[in-house]
Amino acid sequence: MSTELIPLAVLMFLVTYPSRALGLLTPWLDRLPRVGFDYLQLVGPAVLAALAAVAVMVVTDAAGTPTFHVGIEWVAVLACLAVTAWRRNLLMGLIAAVAIVVIARATGFAAIPV
Amino acid sequence: MGIGASALGFGFVYGLSAREAGFSPIEAIAMSLIVFGGASQFAAVGYIASGMAWPAIVVLTGLLNARHLLYSAALAPWLRNVPFVRRAVAAHLLTDEAFALSVAHFRRVGRTDEWGYWIAAIASTLIPWNVATAVGVVLGGQIPNPMQFGVDIIFPAAMIGLSVGLITGRRELTAAIVGAGVGVAVALLTSPAVGIIAGGLVGPVAGLLVPARLARETAPLGTTPSAERYAMPGARFERDAEQSEDKP
């Protein structure tokens, strides 16, 4: 069984860990000015929303060029957003999102990604 | 439970994709344990399948995972009293899911709950992610075209669902909307990784610009109540210092 890619995993870890550790292990971060605290409290919603939006609205072709994408995924993510906000239950939101995509693809309304 | 389910689904798709890209089970599982970064692992599968050179993969991985710097900084005030070694271990387990779950939990209970972080990071994410990776890479070939089951929507749906848990006012809502808009715009102009970081940096600025009147904040920005809003554990504010000086 091949293990050739394990060194690559280690290299990927080496460039990922500093991002994860820098904030947690830097002592002066807890002495930020108040506006700094306020800024950091807004980071979570911004990053997570950006992750979701980029994941469903931007696709990268074989040449690596990002292009705008419109599809059933938008509806699914918005449904998850609505259900999670309404019921305060992420699992229900995920089920709604997956159900929409499954039905749309099964009925031919949306194409199945390659 | 929702996070565990999303980690299971997303991990399964990763395992499946890794298998199709030619990873051995050991390589796929090792990557999930060592890197433990879903989006970057997915991207790496695509890069490897397209024959990209390792240095380029490593650079792109660093870029894609740079958003963790923001999470790490945001968590720092909560975990500052945790011993250094445990914070160093916690850093490796810091994911989108662990961050969102633990911060929402800390805010709810009004203090740091270290066990809450470990449960969010290990029980809700690390274990399901790695188990699902193994299942996906070993058994995934027996499922014809799993995309028809909508597994690819789990990651973005989970991310937007997690953001809902962190939106407690109009400032957070503004940060999320602007973060998403900037993220997509910059991603289209550059790359998805850069877009996500740009959204994460610009969104909070937009949130801070929301006037207190519109945000209906009971604690205006830049004031002690604003800093106290999230009950930073052990935080000592100027007002507190003044009060303690007044005491005999």
Image (cartoon, coloured by chain):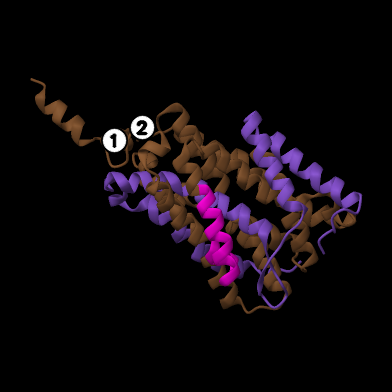
Chain colours: A purple, B brown
Q: Which kind of residue does numbered mark 1 sit on?
A: Ala
Residue in view at x 54 percent, y 43 percent = B98
Quadrant for the N terminus of chain B in the image: top right
> Is B183 inside the magenta-drawn segment?
yes
Q: Which kind of residue does numbered mark 2 sit on?
A: Ala
Asked whether residue B75 is in view, the answer is no
Question: Alpha-carbon distance for marks 1 and 2?
Answer: 8 Å
Could you classify mark 2 by the number of other residues whose Cα lies within 10 Å: few (under 14), some (14-19), or many (20 or more)? Answer: some
Q: What secondary structure is found at the residue carrying circle 1?
A: loop
Q: Nearer the viewer, residue B242 or B124?
A: B242
**Residue A92 image offset from top left, x and y in percent:** 71, 34
Chain label for disc 1: B
Asked whether residue B215 is in view, the answer is yes
- Quarter residue B237 falls in: top left
Q: Which residue is mark 2?
A: B231
Q: Which residues are magenta?
A: B176-195
* Furthest residue toward front: B213
**A75 left or right, relative to B79:** right
Quadrant for the C terminus of chain B in the image: top left
**Residue B187 image offset from top left, x and y in percent:** 58, 66
Q: Which residue is mark 1?
A: B235
**Residue B38 image offset from top left, x and y in percent:** 63, 55
Q: Nearer the viewer, residue B183 or B247?
A: B183
Chain label for disc 2: B
Q: Nearer the viewer, residue B248 or B194?
A: B194
Query: Are dots 1 and 2 in contact, CB under 8 Å?
Result: yes
**Residue B225 image offset from top left, x and y in percent:** 30, 32
Residue in view at x 67 percent, y 59 percent = A57
Residue in view at x 63 percent, y 66 percent = A6
Identify the disc placed on residue B192: none
